[in-house]
Amino acid sequence: MQKNDLLEKDRDLFYSIEHTGPAFYWMVGLLMTILAFALFTYIIQIKFGLGITGLAQPISWGFYIVNFVFFIGISHAGTLISAILRLSKAEWRRPITRMAEVITAIVLAIGGLHPIIDQGQPERILHLVTSGRLQSPLLWDVTSITAYFAASTVYLYLPLIPDIAILRDRGTKPRWLYQFLSWGWQGTERQKKILERAINILMVMVIPIAVSVHTVISYIFAMTIQPGWHSTIFGPYFVAGAIFSGIAALLIVMIAFRKVYHLERYLKEIHFKYLSTLLLIMSLIWFYFTFSEYLTTFYGHEPDEMKVFFYKFTGDFSPYFWIMVICNFIIPVGILSNSKTRNITGIFIASVCVLIGMWLERLIIVVPSLANPRLEYPTGIYIPTLTEWALFAGGVAVFILGFLIFAKYFPLISIWEIEEGRETSISEVAHRLSSYLPDDVEQDEIKKILK
Amino acid sequence: MKNTIKYLTPVILVIALTGIISGTNQDVRQPISFNHKLHTEEVGLACVDCHSNVEKHSRALIPNIETCGDCHDDAEDENREKAKVGSYVSRNEKIPWIQIHVVPDHAYFSHRRHVTLAKIECQTCHGEVSEMERPFIIPFVELEMSWCINCHEKSKVVNDCNSCHR
Amino acid sequence: MARWGMVIDLNKCTGCAECVTACKVENNVAVVGKDESEMGRTMLWMDILTHYEGEYPNTKVRYLPRPCLQCDNPPCTKVCPVRATYLDPEGIVAQIFPQCIGCRYCMAACPYTVKSFNWYEPHWPQEMAAALNPDVSARPAGVVEKCTFCVHRLQKAKEQADSENRELQDNEYIPACAEDCPTQAISFGDLDSPHSEVSELIRSPRIFTLLEELGTEPKVYYLSEIE
């Protein structure tokens, strides 16, 4: 009886799995076309060499590395936010965590492939295993991204098991898939206990791994002695930027899928309000880091550093730099600090701006330092070619495609956690509240008010 | 599902077998069925009598046609193989031997260093060539880096990448 | 063991670029063509940097030949993930092409920007292709390369010395650039041997290295110009 009730109540959550309209297939077809084109250009790149990109000496890193840093940055949305929200027992997390975790898993896979795309000899990738040297920051990256990918896919999968079991019991096709993935979940007390423990362990573990991932990516740059890269704040700067772009990506995904799959009952204004507050805070933190980074450079006024500094502020890269400042700081702060503009549309615009701005930030970190070598070389301007754009589009296409396919087979909002929320959160919150308040406030009273 | 496997198995087997057969039986045909045994045992030549570069140069090279010409010049010999040599000699034309022991381009191997300085026997790398009645069609050892390194480590000689890779 | 080093006398250098040509021929450095070159993909193991001073008409041009500086504390070898570049026992920063995965991290880390990347499979005009140096491999597409102090010449010289059962002598091993310099501006030798030309030259008050303040300790020294 309970089960039927639940199914009736949460009908909307099965919508994406049970109704596949023509729009879905059109979208998948379109994305597949983009992906096929990206693959085609990559095959050409393998055949002829990296010469078909816009890279040269001394700007030998370009779009691929920028996108690598960017995509891995977005991956922080997920697991980190979801783990922090779970850890802090934020009740409003329930409809958000799943989406956040999916972003991490997909984007991490895309980002992790970028260094391989960038490699001149991709078939020698196994040299990293057979003769890798732990003193190279690139190897730190391989290690920590692999760990993060493993941890975050498990962290996505574990809370998914009860939902898969629900789908299995509903007889959703393909049955073998749910039969296999549900791992014999029956929802017994013992199973619940084990699952809860596993999730608890993972969410604590995942946070330091996530922080390490982006710190280590920043180390790729910071460990060199190049002007503009050799900076001690790069670790936290990159982590803050990653969380910033991650939240923006999460907000965009939430708004888009709420609209497409009619999830308004679950993703309410309040969720956007809370997350956008976080976005606003991150925007301020980002500005603080950027300000410190460039002020130190400017004040020290070291000639080599200043070459890079002026290249960004007034030189060839100044349009990108100032667009970045507008997108990452002025627009989001303008929109989000005003309660009138802080509605879904406003948040959406701010999030899109942040994604653009954060992508530009990665570009501004990677290219100008390379474009201004210390010795007097003639340097050209880096102009990415069609190949690089195609592979960028391919990356974005894989992201959307991955999300659509996930939504086709699995619920985007954790059904059992919503159910759990209905059953237990009121008494839990009441209990928690009473522990905050002076002893004379009765728990039952709070419960009454809450109901 | 089961049926697919049933039908696919023979297909896979056939593919695998053709792979194995074509992999082992490389159709290398040397221009002349050279007999090392005959030259060393009956004629009494030493390796370096013909492979004269080995001791003095880094590259061994195949003996040139003049070396053959020292003994062979009869293009009309009743032995067909001898006659072939004779005809190459009379035309002063290189014999198109197919090189079997190939060191890749990025690795450098000096015969002088190994034969003259380190006093390594030819047989260590090329096997008992003087027992061979037919020319090489497969190398005596797979010339892989691990094989080089093994010996270098055992004999405690330089192991630096730079000394072989250039 | 020797510690190979180079001293370039800027007072003698005329900027004729003979060293550049000698290096290109000796080491089979690919010729990329005009279009690629304009993109900034010229491959030079030895390059000549030009520095313009003063305002017209009182201008002065300075030339600075720049091979790989063979640092004793190289920023590039630290970051290589697969040990395709490392400091060999004789102080040469080795670059092992068959090991390189082409991540270009060493290029980004080198403060002197001395490394080149094979953006395409290298090719030479037909006449040149027939005259490639057999002692140096032609690199495939997708690997990083740079000046190696003509290390193949060192191996050859050592082998020759060994076969004559004697020590390696001064001036027996010289890179192509030093050998071909018409004004003998480039000296080469063992920095640790007390009587070698280079070890005497580095005691000169005119001596300096590039970007000394970075602590990379290059083994390519320069003698400043006399005004």
Image (cartoon, coloured by chain):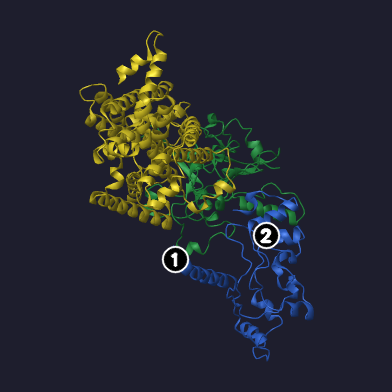
Q: State whether residue B7 is above or below residue A248.
A: below
Query: x and y percent of residue C163 in the render?
Result: 74, 57
Badge 2 marks a residue whose secondary structure is loop
At x 62%, y 35%, the residue is C202
Chain displayed in yellow: A
The residue that mark 1 highlights is: B4
Chain displayed in blue: B
Q: Which chain carries label 1?
A: B
The residue that mark 2 highlights is: B110
Looking at the picture, which amino acid does disc 1 mark? Thr
Looking at the picture, which amino acid does disc 2 mark? Ser
Q: State whether residue A321 is above or below residue B74.
A: above
The answer to whether any part of residue A66 appears in the image is no
Query: x and y percent of residue A153 in the render?
Result: 45, 41
Chain displayed in green: C
Query: x and y percent of residue A166 in the render?
Result: 38, 42
